[in-house]
Image (cartoon, helix red, strand yellow):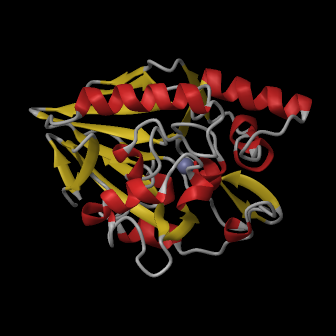
Amino acid sequence: MQKIGDFTLDRVIESEEPLFDAQAFLPDSTPEVIEANRDWLFPTFIDPATANLIITVQSYIIKTPRYTILVDACVGNDKERPARPMWHKMNNPYLADLAAAGVKPEEVDFVMCTHLHVDHVGWNTRLVDGRWVPTFPNAKYIFGKTELEFWLQREKTGEEGPVPNVYADSIGPVMDANQAVLVEMDHQFDNGIWFEPAPGHTPGNFVIHLESGDDKALLTGDVMHHPLQLARPDWSSRACEDRIESAKTRRALIERYADTDMMIAPAHFASPSTGHICSHGDGFKFNLTGD
Ligand SMILES: [Zn+2]
């Protein structure tokens, strides 16, 4: 757990493993650049045994003096994900781990989804008596309006993108329960917590700023998936809807915060996940600072 002024920032990990082949997940990546950055990428961010990218799927928990906020809801249990065998019908102790972090489902005041991808909305709902119901009964779920409209359109047309549409089991039940709040991508949530548009990975993707006292942090969601993208900010993932816009957003964010004291909290970086962006050779690197 880290302190950001009066806030705390904690994590609940659903999975952390050498999940993706680098070239498959970042199609522009090259073994030469990986080799040139071996000193800081291995073994923390790339598994030496398989050379696969280590990917964490996790939620961030923000506690303010008033609210408990869960950011990004992982893959979830029992979800039918045949196109993603590693995430198909999972049975993980996520809720027990959340409880171990001091949070019961009914204590979550807000769920914020940086975007509505399969690995960010799963625990929005859980299976009870054969029905998907909101996991957090007292929470308002904050969804970006642009993002929601994008997935509703996909739902209507049946069009397939790089990532399957999971509206039916992970978004719709929250809408039906009247627990969703739709906001603009630059939404001002509360003192010291606001969103900033970060489109590309998905059209409605946003990042979350935290500021309390002299401390600042930025929850960057999937603007970048793996620290290797700091070596080459233009390398977008195969999961990006618009790889060119995603690269533009990523590069701008990296250049803005490189060599500053901004704490960066990406969704998928290996534990302890949070750290700082630093210039490194002709690119950048990630310095973990830990929880
Ligand atoms: Zn993701």
Q: Position of residue 236 (x, y in %)?
A: 53, 40
Q: Position of residue 121 (x, y in %)?
A: 61, 48
**Depicted 291 relative to depicted 172: above or below:** below
Q: Position of residue 289 (x, y in %)?
A: 18, 56
In-image side of 154 versus 5 (left or right): right
> Considering the image in quadrants, where does the C terminus appear?
bottom left
**Depicted 277 relative to depicted 48: above or below:** above
In-image side of 6 versus 286 (left or right): left
In-image side of 98 versus 271 (left or right): right
Q: Nearer the viewer, residue 131 or 30?
A: 30
Say how many tags the image has.
0
**Depicted 200 relative to depicted 174: above or below:** above
Q: Quadrant of residue 179?
A: top right
Q: Nearer the viewer, residue 183 or 237?
A: 237
View extreme (front): residue: 32
Let me know if residue 203 appears in the view.
yes
Let me know if residue 15 appears in the view.
no
Q: Nearer the viewer, residue 273 or 103?
A: 273
| Residue beneath the point at 83% across and 64% down | 130
| Residue beneath the point at 58% across and 74% down | 92
| Residue beneath the point at 46% across and 60% down | 31
> Considering the image in quadrants, where does the N terminus appear?
bottom left
| Residue beneath the point at 34% across and 64% down | 102
Q: Quadrant of residue 109?
A: top left
